[in-house]
Amino acid sequence: MSSDEEIPQKRNINFRFVAQIALIILLIGIIISSILIFVPLGGKEYTDLEIFTYNEIDSIYETDNLPTSANYNQTAGLSENITLYFKVENHHRLAKFYEVRLKIGLYSLNIDEETYGNETTTYLYEEHWKNRVLARDQDWGPNLQTEITFNFNSSILSHLGYEANGYKIIFELWEFSSSENSFIYSGIFDYLTDFLLNLVS
């Protein structure tokens, strides 16, 4: 070997530096794993329910022009028809089986996340209850499938009485529970309040 040739120098490995890098990578992995375990993918999971009416002039569904009253013919025992639409949004990671229930209650009725209308406090408009399975991030309505056309009839007034201060038109969202093998109240609701009946002959 020529004396002019350079002899390669051995590099000393800084084991402390390598250990620090490995520790940082390990800590990052633990943090990411914790986030994936405790935080649902795609953000917060929730369901939304909203009531709409249809604006025929502009051909759009809207929430700011909901009806506030209807004429009730005392001779016929019926009010004019009331048409509403609803929208359900499933923002869960799994499919959900929902049921929207229409109920009529007095103005003073209390409805919240734990209290729903029962046979005593509300008129159960069961013929207008609708249910459907929604996939992840799927919407249901507003469209003809979620249209509900109903009226106040003599059965409602016999059950609840006439309320001069108005009524609540309630939409409750129920969710099917496999463990209960039935629908249970989700705590989600929307309603029209102060809905007045104008009595006419």
Image: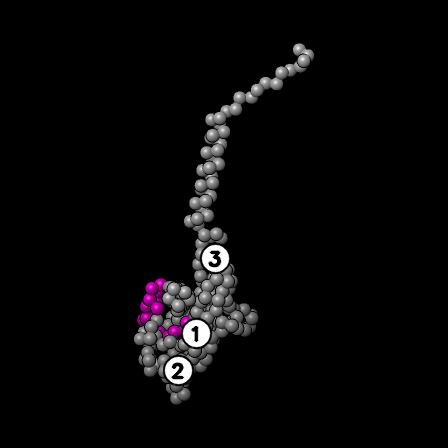
Q: Which residue is mark 2?
A: 153
Amino acid found under the numbered disc labelled 1: Trp
Where the C terminus falls, by quadrant? bottom left
C-alpha separation, residue under disc 3 versus residue under disc 2:
41 Å
Q: Is residue 172 above or below residue 28?
A: below
The quadrant holding residue 8 is: top right
Counting from the top left corner in percent of width and height, residue 145 is at 51, 72
Depth check: 158 or 135 in front? 135
The quadrant holding residue 126 is: bottom left
Q: Which residue is mark 3?
A: 93
* In magenta segment, residue 2: no
* Label 3 element class: loop
Q: Residue at image x 40%, y 80%?
A: 152
Does the image show residue 82? no
Amino acid found under the numbered disc labelled 2: Asn
Q: Earlier in the sequence, mark 2 or mark 1?
A: 1
Amino acid found under the numbered disc labelled 3: Arg
Which mark is nearer the camera, 3 or 2? 3
Q: Residue at image x 37%, y 66%?
A: 180
Most distant residue in the bottom direction: 75
Q: Earlier in the sequence, mark 3 or mark 2?
A: 3
**Residues drawn in magenta:** 101-116
Which mark is nearer the camera, 2 or 1? 1
Q: Which residue is mark 1?
A: 129
The quadrant holding residue 112 is: bottom left
Q: Main secondary structure of the magenta part?
A: loop
Q: Residue at image x 48%, y 69%?
A: 132
* Label 1 element class: loop
Q: Earlier in the sequence, mark 1 or mark 3?
A: 3
> Contact, CB < 8 Å: mark 3 with mark 2?
no
C-alpha separation, residue under disc 2 versus residue under disc 1:
17 Å
Q: Residues within 10 Å of mark 3 (few under 14, many from 20)?
A: some
